[in-house]
Image (spheres, helix red, strand yellow):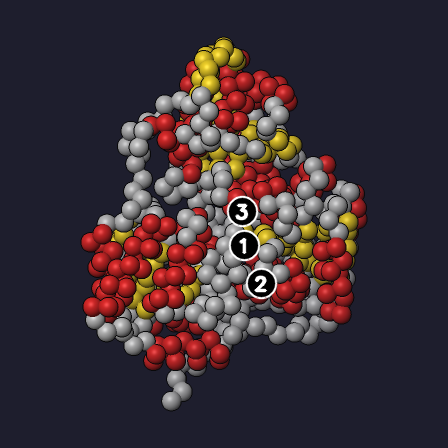
Amino acid sequence: AAPASAVRGPNRVVGPVEMLGSAAIVRSLEELGVDDVFGLPGGAILPTYDPLMASTKLRHILVRHEQGAGHAAQGYAMVTGRPGVCIATSGPGATNLVTAIADAHMDSVPMVAITGQVSSAFIGSDAFQEADIVGITMPITKHSYLVTNAQDIPRVLAEAFHIATTGRPGPVLVDVAKDAQQSKMSFSWPPKVDIPGYRPVVRGHSKQVREAARLISASQRPVFYVGGGVVKAHAAAELKELAEFVGAPVVTTLMARGVFPDSHDQHVGMPGMHGSVSAVTALQQADLLITLGARFDDRVTGVLSSFAPNAKVIHADIDPAEISKNRMADVPIVGSVKEIIPELTAAVRDSFEAQERPDISAWWKTIRHLRETYPVGFTQPDDGLSAPQQVIKRIGELTGPEGVFVSGVGQHQMWAAQFIQYERPHAWLNSGGLGTMGYSVPAAMGAKVGNPDRVVWAIDGDGCFQMTNQELATCVINNIPIKVAVINNSSLGMVRQWQTLFYEGRYSNTDLNTGHDTVRVPDFVKLADAYGCVGLRCERDEDIDATIEQALAINDRPVVVDFVVSRDSMVWPMVPSGVSNDLIQIARNMTPTWEQED
């Protein structure tokens, strides 16, 4: 393809026009097709905020903390498929973005972070608000740029968007020195983008695809192990066609929830540390893993040496570094699953026509027995408070599959993955790889900006919520009516669960005093009111539905619901850290009975 094809946006021909570097940043974003940016100004990026004020094409949303800008850009990208954009100043402004950049890197989210830098003459002198953000972020970005020449701005931004959105998506940082923003340059568009050495492979090797089809044809116990890469590739329809043709069980990881419908008979659950017995065991007992856009994460595999011990592995992924990184692939296929899956479907069809379709009915008998015998469920607390699982389940049921659910990190994250029915991709957002507390509220804000017509829930914990709830002010001022469900167990729930199970109930520094029978610091209903939101509280089972329906009926401002729940509820099933997935527990000290019925 011609180099110009690497430039995003409508590729209008512009220029040459003389302008300042700061204006070139704004104009480049406009030409790249950007509509929304999240940011917070400061001295080193101030030159760019001046022309930004005059832009009629860019909506800038002023956040209250730079980390919020980064997570909002992530949420926006996750629901739209378009790169999220965030802007911050130098020094602490840039370093406040680091957590969100690392989060985007771990979860393969396309994002461009633009930061101001001190003038080039002062770089390296420990100037006021100077930080080597390029050096800091190099391990957690696909690429990081330092721009000291205004003339480079259009090309660098075009390259940044190209890198962020092609191959395995991810964050790119563009750090622009203040004097480059203030210097004159000649702007023209589109710039020439040619990045030596960066040529992502999209199409899978045909010989490897045929070999994968041969393994599928020979398998008696195949399983589709589907990861977040299928969501990022927008390949849900292609996956469904292949899965239905092969007829094998499908497991969807935490990052892939919704890419294959939960209601589909072939879906057997989520694998991993808190996955369903049917999904975890399907992987353990499989003779073939058809791995699509997944990376054999430690939370899925447990002890790697004991994971799926008798299975051969087909591994298709856009990132060649992931292939055989953790588990050796018998058939590696590098490329986009969007391209690979249809090719694999055609190859399997040819293979099934050439020989008899394998009989996997006995395999399905085993899987269905596990699915029916060990469904994911919960017990009612004995302290009189609501079960958090019931609250989250009803949020999902009353909102419906067209809603967007954005979780924080911890117990509520796992319950939201387990008890909400996901029927479509891009309905579930969470911080999977980095596990960032504080992700939910700003990511939900970005998701609502990207999908304004959908109901967006931030399902948060009382610990996570206190890390980034300042973005409620951003939501109120900018008319972004998200709904926040605070699953308030008055503690750092997942840490407390581990203290219960592995530290003899020694609850060191996990009480937050936000819930039932505590001093309620803060009082979340009063906090919501102070921010201009609607604040609700639900403390009884009989009020759950009415409270959720009340929240769903309010669409002119954000709603915060304080769901006061039992602190003793735990996430089950669970594979304790450091043991084989075969030792999955369905409750405390309870493991499944593996004998099969005749």
- The local crowd at label 1, few if under 14, some if 14 to 19, many if 20 or more residues have their Cα within 10 Å, is many
Q: Position of residue 535 (x, y in %)?
A: 77, 51
The residue where tag 2 is placed is: 420
Element on which disc 2 rests: loop
Instruction: Say whether disc 3 or disc 2 marks the residue closer to the N-terminus.
Output: 3
Task: Inspect the image, locate mark 1, and give the three-letter code of the amino acid beneath it.
Answer: Trp
Pick the quarter of the image with the N terminus. top left
> Do callouts 1 and 2 mark residues in contact (Cβ within 8 Å)?
yes
* Distance CA(mark 1)–CA(mark 2): 9 Å
The residue where tag 1 is placed is: 428
Q: Is residue 189 above or below residue 313?
A: above
Q: Position of residue 193 (x, y in %)?
A: 36, 26
Q: Nearer the viewer, mark 3 or mark 2?
A: 3
Element on which disc 1 rests: strand
Q: Position of residue 211 (x, y in %)?
A: 21, 59
The dot on residue 79 is 3
Task: Inspect the image, locate mark 2, and give the three-letter code of the amino acid beneath it.
Answer: Ile
* Distance CA(mark 3)–CA(mark 2): 18 Å
Q: Is residue 389 above or below residue 435?
A: below
Q: Position of residue 166 (x, y in %)?
A: 38, 39
- Residue at the spot x=59%, y=45% of the render? 451
- Residue at the spot x=58%, y=63% of the render? 420
- The local crowd at label 3, few if under 14, some if 14 to 19, many if 20 or more residues have their Cα within 10 Å, is many
